[in-house]
Image (cartoon, rainbow, N blue to C red):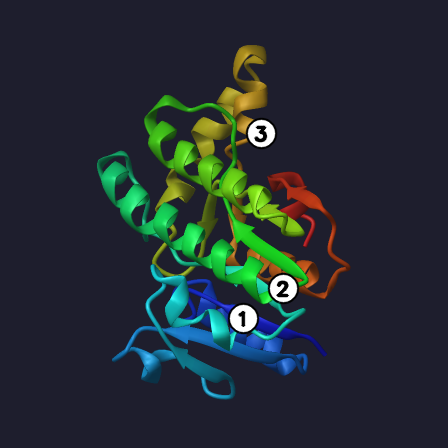
Amino acid sequence: MKTVFITGSTGYIGTRLIKLLLKKGHHIIALARKGSEDKVPAGCEVVIGDPFDANTFQRSIPKDAVFVQLLGVSHPSPSKAEQFKQIDLRSVKASADAAAKSGVSHFIYISVSMVPLKIMEAYQQVRKEGEEFCVSKNLNCSFIRPWYVLGPGHWWPVLLLPFYGIAYLVPAWKEKIKGMRLVTISQMINTLVKTVEADPERKKIIEISEIKKS
């Protein structure tokens, strides 16, 4: 059994991850903003704090806990470049600061595929900065890099599958398409659970091909 501290505990991935980790017997501590604590799945310990201010939750992170950073802008799009900086980047920096001061054993961050794509350049840049900041704090880090996660309310990219099939046959597009493959919510949750339960490494990057095996 591991103690797991989670941000983004009331979100699309967070609620599903918490339920599975609880089922597997782990002790979950969920960070929630005041007024959102009732949205956290039952069965875990809830810490009320500001995800952008490490001082409000750092003391609630047990030494040697696994920290899972999930907080971020929902439904990323090119129009949300400023939100990525104000929400995604600020929150991961606060989390990494708190995790480093608390002496966590493992820091897990959902990043994004780094295959260059102009339309999502701002999002990729913020996630890259987030990864670099975590490494700078001397944390044992795992960076999970999906492109888009299919699931309830997130099915529209299925319409693009015919395009994916055609583009994959074009040599110049093949590598880019491999870095834009879709993964399912169950694959993401299973990948996260495996990463939580695995022995930490100094820096581990989990790409789409590995996520799809889960």
- Give whichever of 46, 53 is nearer the camera: 53
Label 3: few (<14), some (14–19) or many (≥20) C-alpha neighbours in 10 Å: some
The dot on residue 104 is: 2
- x 53%, y 43%: residue: 146
CA separation, marks 1 and 2?
9 Å
Identify whether 66 is placed above or below 200. Answer: below
Q: Is residue 179 left or right of residue 94?
A: right
Quadrant in which the C terminus appears: bottom right
Whether residue 10 can be seen here:
no
Q: Are marks 1 and 2 in contact (CB under 8 Å)?
A: yes
Q: Quadrant of residue 62?
A: bottom right
Q: Vertically, is 136 above or below 92? A: above
Q: Which residue is mark 3?
A: 178
Q: Position of residue 84 (x, y in %)?
A: 31, 43
Cβ atoms under marks 2 and 3 closer than 8 Å: no
Residue type highlighted by circle 2: Val
Seen at 40% across and 37% down, the residue is 126
Q: Which mark is residue 202?
A: none
**According to the image, label 1 marks what residue?**
5
Q: Say what amino acid the circle numbered 3 marks.
A: Lys
Q: Is residue 183 above or below residue 104?
A: above
Residue 64: percent from the left, percent from the top? 67, 69
Residue 132 in the image: x percent, y percent?
A: 53, 38
**Could you tell which of marks 1 and 2 lies nearer the N-terminus?**
1
What amino acid type should be assigned to the residue bearing mark 1?
A: Phe
Q: Position of residue 78 (x, y in %)?
A: 27, 34
> 170 or 21: which is nearer to us?
21
Label 1 neighbour load within 10 Å: few <14, some 14-19, many 20+: many
Sequence order check, earlier mark of 2 and 3? 2
C-alpha distance separating marks 3 and 1: 32 Å
Residue at figure coordinates x 50%, y 21% from the top left: 167
Q: Nearer the viewer, mark 1 or mark 2?
A: 2
